[in-house]
Image (tube, rainbow, N blue to C red):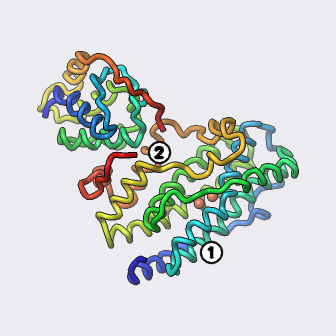
Amino acid sequence: MTSIALREAFHREFMTFFERAERTRRWSVFDDVPWDRLPEVPAERELALAAETFCGIEMFLPDYLQAHLSLLVGDYGQAWFSANWGYEEAKHALALREYLLRSGQRTETQMREFGEAVMARRWEPPYRTPRQMVVYSAFQELTTFVSYRKQRERAQRTADPVLTEVYRLIGRDEMAHCRFYQRILSLHLDEDRAGTLKDLAHVVRTFRMPAHELLPDREDRESVRTTGFGNGAFITEVVLPSLGALGLTRHDLYSTAATVPAAR
Amino acid sequence: MTPSDIPQVLHRAYQQVTQRDPGTLDRDADIRALGVDSVQLLEMIVIAETELGLRVPDAALGGVETVGDLYDMLGEALPQTQGQGRVQAQAQAQAQVSVPVEARGAR
Ligand SMILES: [Fe+2]
Ligand SMILES: [Fe+2]
């Protein structure tokens, strides 16, 4: 259990996050996606497969939510954040699903079968402590943001105005989630710098993106999922910018305080 | 520390991070073919920076593909007073041959 002072600080962070979300970031699957431009959507197999793959990853939401909430008993700020986060994440899967259906690239039957294949598997949280899950979430949200940014650029190049906008709306949410987790991490660093650095180093060493290995036809999806996310992108586009946002350097990560056994 | 120390320092960093002996590190060897993933590479660079007393800019980290890239990157970050960083690091590194046995895919 985290200290009362820390929990109160989490709550203030949640209120800041929530106020900003309510005032500047709310969007509707029904009204804010340019569905009137569906006739312009090109039939691009790879683009549709990527959209379906990310839709599948987002569909593990019940498992993600359960993992977070079960770790956050008594932590009002973070639990409320998770509830709001779950609402926002739910729209990500829905928007991608609607795109695939309305553009005619998938049928209702195909989406139902895909959904059933996804829901037949379970995602297990990779870490057991709330703080390690915060570190994991900060990296995971930024990785997701970078992935969606690359997908958006691809949709733009393919002249798909609908998918481009879907990815823009989703990516903006992912960045907001990432910033929230970074703020929570800063508070953890203020309270227990050595322990938090140790968790950061551990999660960097062991990080894996969630759930993609649970999707059906995994091999076909792997190359579309990682488009533009080459060797080392996790370091240059996720780890180093995250450390920078926390006022840390890579040397802090591997300082004596953060050193853990090299076994992986 | 001088450019001629770079191969030794990297040899030790490789051992520390992977818990394996790399034998000798060939300039042309692909880092990932040596079983070093991007996170381990970052850790090796931090160890080498600390031992050599230098800092490589973040922007340079994305371009490392081979052992030679690593030598050059660290050589270029050495203060000029310590010699012709890149040239000496290359000369030293060219004397190294053979690649470790354990080669694994990377992240
Ligand atoms: Fe999402
Ligand atoms: Fe998110």
Position of A139 compared to A158: left or right?
Answer: left
Whole-number angstrom distance, CA of label 2 to CA of label 1: 31 Å
- What's the amino acid at mark 1? Glu
- Residue at x 23% of width, y 16% of height: B95
Residue at the disc numbered 2 = A234
Q: Are marks 2 and 1 on the same chain?
A: yes
Looking at the rendered structure, which numbered label has been put on residue A22?
1
Q: Dot 1 falls on which chain?
A: A
Q: Quadrant of residue A7?
A: bottom left
Q: Is residue A165 among what the camera can see?
A: no
Location of the N terminus of chain A by quadrant is bottom left
Q: Dot 2 falls on which chain?
A: A
Position of A148 compared to A139: left or right?
Answer: right
- Residue at x 56% of width, y 72% of height: A70
- Camera-near label (2 vs 1) is 2
Work out whether residue A218 or residue A77 is closer to the camera in this orientation and state it. A218
